[in-house]
């Protein structure tokens, strides 16, 4: 039985049986919808995060990120914990950044000033974890944001895991 047919079966049950199974129905059906959207677009659901640019701005290093949501659900909040390493491989900073809401199919750009005094001193930015992944509609994909995270990098330092 496919997930879509399981979803249809759940919806066809009499109302008195559907109510006790509401949570299961929501989980099965939302995952099926996400899967169907991914098959329609030809790609798997993903949360894309790209380090697009590092630039020196006065006494701070500004990091510009591009984030895109194609997981099939709007995110009411997304945040990432980053660890910055210096040229010697030592940890310089560990911070969480809130990217705000990220609707499905939307791409956003966010800039953050890092505590590092010079961009040239940063050799690597580790995406330590997703610190926040909140959605209005529960879905298995949104509950497992780290599993659908894809990393991109347009800079000359290491970025990702």
Image (cartoon, grey):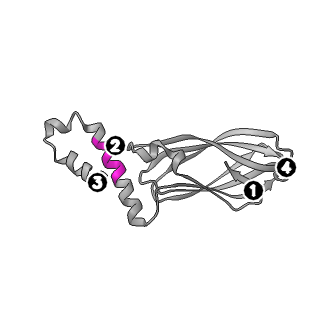
User: Whole-percent x and y of residue 57?
Assistant: 79, 54
* CA distance separating discs 1 and 2: 40 Å
Question: Which label lies toward us, 2 or 4?
Answer: 2
Q: Residue at x 27, y 42 (%)?
A: 25
* CA distance separating discs 3 and 1: 44 Å
User: Whole-percent x and y of residue 94?
Assistant: 72, 38
Question: Which label lies toward us, 1 or 2?
Answer: 2
Q: Residue at x 38, y 60 (%)?
A: 37
**In the rendered image, which residue does mark 1 sit on?**
54
Asked if the residue at tag 4 contacts the one at tag 2, i.e. Cβ–Cβ closer than 8 Å, the answer is no
Secondary element at image label 4: helix
Q: Which residues are magenta?
A: 25-32
Question: In the displayed structure, does residue 153 sit left or right of residue 15?
Answer: right
Q: Which of the marked residues, 1 or 2, is nearer the chain's N terminus?
A: 2
* CA distance separating discs 2 and 3: 12 Å
In this view, 55 is above or below 126: below
Question: In the displayed structure, does residue 20 sit left or right of residue 32?
Answer: left
**In the rendered image, which residue does mark 2 sit on?**
27
**In the rendered image, which residue does mark 3 sit on?**
4
**In the rendered image, which residue does mark 4 sit on?**
121
Q: Residue at x 74, y 45 (%)?
A: 114
Q: Which of the marked residues, 4 or 1, is nearer the chain's N terminus?
A: 1
Secondary element at image label 2: helix
Q: Which of the marked residues, 4 or 3, is nearer the chain's N terminus?
A: 3
Question: In the displayed structure, does residue 60 sit left or right of residue 101?
Answer: right
Q: Nearer the viewer, residue 81 or 5?
A: 5
């Amino acid at each position: 039985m496919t997930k879509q047919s399981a979803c249809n079966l759940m919806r066809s049950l009499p109302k008195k049986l559907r109510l006790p199974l509401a949570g299961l129905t929501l989980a099965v059906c939302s995952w099926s919808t996400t899967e169907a959207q991914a098959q329609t677009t030809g790609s798997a659901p993903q949360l894309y995060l790209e380090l697009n640019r590092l630039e020196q701005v006065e006494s701070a290093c500004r990091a510009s990120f591009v984030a895109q949501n194609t997981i099939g659900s709007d995110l009411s909040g997304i945040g990432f914990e980053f660890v910055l390493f210096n040229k010697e491989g030592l940890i310089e900073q560990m911070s969480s950044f809130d990217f705000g809401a990220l609707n499905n199919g939307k791409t956003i750009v966010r800039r953050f000033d890092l505590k590092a005094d010079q961009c040239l001193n940063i050799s690597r930015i580790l995406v330590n974890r997703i610190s926040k992944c909140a959605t209005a509609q529960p879905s298995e994909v949104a509950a497992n944001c780290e599993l659908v995270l894809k990393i991109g990098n347009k800079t000359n330092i290491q970025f990702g895991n």
